[in-house]
Image: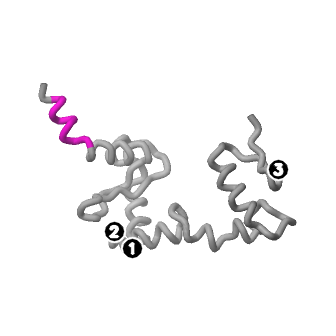
Amino acid sequence: MELKCKYCNRLCKNKQSLNSHETQCKLNTNKKDRSGPNNPMFGKPAWNKRPGTAPYHNYKLKHDLNVSIDYIENYKQEIDCCEICGRKVKLCVDHCHKTKKFRGLLCRVCNRQLGWYEKQKNKIEEYLRV
């Protein structure tokens, strides 16, 4: 199934990205160029304010976890793999959601599984006691 924007015929990867693109495309009054980073609709100022971008990430580290980017970079020099499984992939900053303290660097899989385990810890331990 081909997912094309009804305003500019741009191909999108999935239904969610198509809906997002069409919403922005509909609001775009500049009909010349609707795709790419040069378009004011998709320009860098909007990207820099969204979660997952470097400025947002740096702000969260500094203000929420009280950890500097330099500290994380130095830590990455010492620990170059996931601290649970040992895979050498892109690492996430792990922290305790209750205390807001930095714990280490994990791969995405371990970071998600650890979060799930923390939420289900009592049920899991009860199940394993049987």
**33 part of magenta stretch:** no
Q: Residue at x 42, y 43 (%)?
A: 109
Between the residue at mark 3 and the residue at mark 1, the CA separation in whole angstroms equals: 41 Å
Left or right: 71 in relation to 52: left
* Contact check, label 2 and label 1, Cβ < 8 Å: yes
Q: Which residue is mark 3?
A: 9
Q: Crowding near pointer 2: few (<14 within 10 Å), some, many (20+)?
A: some
Residue designated by label 1: 62
Residue 127 sits above or below residue 82 on the image: above
**Which amino acid type corresponds to the residue marked 3 in the rendered image?**
Asn
C-alpha separation, residue under disc 2 versus residue under disc 3? 43 Å
The percent coordinates of residue 78 (x first, y second) are: 38, 58
Question: Residue at the spot x=72%, y=55% of the render?
Answer: 22
Magenta range is 120-128
Q: Residue furthest top?
A: 130
Residue at mark 2 to residue at mark 1: CA–CA distance: 6 Å
- The kind of residue tagged 1 is Lys
Quick one: SS at disc 1?
A: helix
Instruction: Specify the amino acid type for callout 2.
Output: Leu
| 23 left or right, relative to 53 | right
